[in-house]
Amino acid sequence: MTKNEAFYINLGSMTTAVRAKEALEKNGYKSTVGKTGTASGCSWGVWVKEATRAEVIDFIRREGIHV
Amino acid sequence: MIYMDNSATSFPKPECVRQAVFDSFDKYYANPGRSSHSAAVNTAMEIYKSREAVARLVNTSSENVVFTYNATYALNSAIFGTVGDGARVVTSLYEHNSVLRPLWRLEKEKGVKVSFIKPCTPDKTVTAADFEKIVKTSKKPEVLVLTHTSNVTGYKLPVKELGEICRRENILFILDASQGLGTSEIDMEELCVDILCSSGHKGLYGISGSGFMAFSRKNTLTPRPLVLGGSGVLSREKDMPEALPERLEAGTLGVAGVLSIRAGIEYIESIGLQEISRRTRSIRRYLLEGLSVIPSLELISPEINADSIILFNSKKRSCEETAFELDRSGVAVRAGLHCAPLAHELLNTPNGAVRISVSHFNTFAECDEVLKILSHMA
């Protein structure tokens, strides 16, 4: 995946997704909150672009958010 | 109207609170946590900032802030959600019915044993020693539910001392902070509080229909939800999600109320909690000194180190008559039992009393006017 492709990270609740988006934005990442269908109904996460999935997941974990 | 009923709900509200409510019509109108379009996410972001504001105020993390519709809803959620069948619960005689009635219901239906910390001092204050006596019995309590500040007299209970006992003895500590927040520093970590419940429309200047519960940073509780319904997540599951705050926020949030709480907290932060407290206390002290020289009035617990409340009775009229006469003269106060019947029993005011509750918006000129009216009423 290149840095120009947007990717989605599933985080569970809307509150967690919003928390992650806020932390990402404060640190210069471009993100938006999104929702996806799951086996248990639906789940919230963040769409991120201009970054790599690995670095974003690492960042989110360092913020104390479970991914 | 001279408004001195701020313990019921505060008035006036700061301009930023009014603006926050209008913003819920104009900018943050979409349902947070349901749809994922931009308007819904924008509202969700504002709700999250409100969680952050509450978390900052009481020292917890933002995900542990659950918005409710008032303090009663928050206290019911905390009590019914955590107190197990047959549990032993301790509380005080200063509690509001939003604590007493849920506990009495549990006592009646679930075999919960409720005991009260009995003040042994002449000034009817609660001491850590009184609580220790209960803790040291063979049947150690599992839960303490306590008010931070009496809504009847303004008396501040020894929350830190009792909280430390709870922490030491592994007793769940639920604090009703409805009357203290906004004038007192309330740090959940420092006070060893597990769940804090509060209204948003009193000392925090939010609108009526707003409140919240806050769980401590180290929370491991998954309370049984009082209300079940849509959560915007895990919709095929038959129960509410495990994670806070969604677990306890079934249904659409009251966005206007939530935003108003944040605006109120930011207003407090802009002035400074200590300055608000100092100003409120000086207004109260001025009024108290004036009331103390009116011979027809009896001040109740005037020695209490309160921020905003004065309780009194007329020697010639019932409390309701006094409040009625004050209202006719343009002064709003509250008479009666203030939904805290046991506190009035303790204070030996079985027929109630008149409560004046000021805010930092009140002026010394308003105090002079109230004192003049009460002097003439005598």
Image: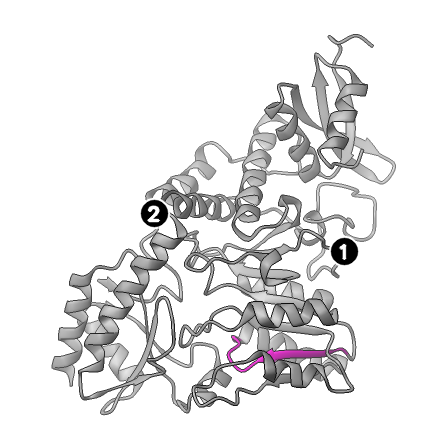
Disc 2 target residue: B14
**Neighbourhood count class around disc 1 (C-alpha, 10 Å): few under 14, some 14–19, many 20 upward:** few
Q: Classify mark 2: helix, strand or loop.
A: loop
Relative side of B41 to B126, left or right = right
| Residue B200 in the figure: left or right of residue B335 | right
Image quarter hosting the C terminus of chain B: bottom left
Reading the image, the residue beneath label 1 is B220
The question of residue B88 being in magenta is answered with yes
Residue B340 screen position, x and y as percent: 48, 79
Q: Relative to B159, is B248 above or below? A: above
Q: Chain of mark 1?
A: B
- Is B200 displayed left or right of B13 in the figure? right
Q: Which residues are magenta?
A: B87-96
Marks 1 and 2, how far apart at CA: 36 Å
Residue B57 in percent (x, y) is at 52, 50
Q: Is residue B217 above or below residue A49?
A: below
Foreground of the two, B365 or B305: B305
The kind of residue on which mark 1 rests is: Thr
For label 1, the SS is: loop
Q: How is the image coloured?
A: one colour
User: Residue B41's quadrant in the figure?
Assistant: top right
- Amino acid type at circle 2 is Pro
Classify residue B111 as left or right of residue B127.
right
Q: Position of residue B270 (x, y in %)?
A: 38, 42
